Image (cartoon, rainbow, N blue to C red):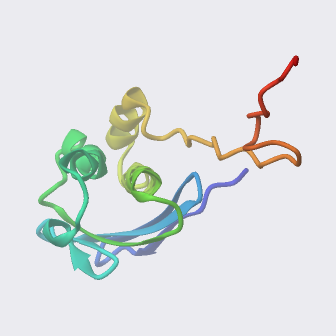
Amino acid sequence: MVEEVKVIKKEKAIYYATGKRKCSIARVWLISGDGQIVVNDKKLDDLHCHFTYKTKLLKPLILTNTKDKYDLKVTVNGGGVSGQTDAIMYGVAKALNTISEEYHRILKQEGLLSRDARIVERKKYFRKKARKRTQYRKR
């Protein structure tokens, strides 16, 4: 499967990547700037999510020491908070991967460049959930 990574303009240094996790899809634009992070037209401080999700989102930028070099503009939809956070993290890692070979080495060692393809299993008929059955009754 071919991953989609585009370098839009080299003069302004705008990098684009798509990250996916569970049912979430994140479109990430990495723009040279001073470190502003905007997710769905809201700043990172205005998001109502747990502290661990915010730190996980910033992990690729912190590992490569580029938190203050690039602005992040993200649009994400689908899934829940956890899936959206992982999708953003994967998208940021893919965008940073296109910038430098050194970033590729750092991100690959941390396992941020591999997509987690696990999704929810579908519900089967005559079952409560995908695998849960009704209780067996002998008498």
Q: Where is residue 19 in the image (x, y as percent from the top left)?
A: 50, 58
Task: Tell me: 13 left or right of 51.
Answer: right
Taking 53 as reference, is 16 above or below it? below
Taking 26 as reference, is 112 above or below it? above
Q: In which quarter of the image is residue 14?
A: bottom left
Q: Position of residue 82 (x, y in %)?
A: 41, 51
Q: In which quarter of the image is residue 62?
A: top left
Q: Quadrant of residue 43?
A: bottom left
Query: Residue at the location (87% across, 19% down)?
Result: 139
Query: Residue at the location (39% across, 57% down)?
Result: 81
Tally the numbered discs: 0
Q: Furthest-front residue in view?
A: 139
Q: Which one is nearer the viewer's eye here, 55 or 112?
A: 55
Q: Where is residue 134 in the image (x, y as percent from the top left)?
A: 79, 34
Task: Tell me: 55 left or right of 77.
Answer: left
Q: Which one is nearer the viewer's eye here, 90 or 54?
A: 54
Query: Residue at the location (75% across, 41% down)?
Result: 130
Q: Which one is nearer the viewer's eye here, 127 or 94?
A: 127
Taking 80 as reference, is 103 above or below it? above
Q: Where is residue 126 in the image (x, y as percent from the top left)?
A: 88, 45
Q: Furthest-top residue in view?
A: 138
Q: Which one is nearer the viewer's eye here, 125 or 21?
A: 125
Query: Residue at the location (16% across, 55% down)?
Result: 67
Task: Tell me: 6 left or right of 69.
Answer: right
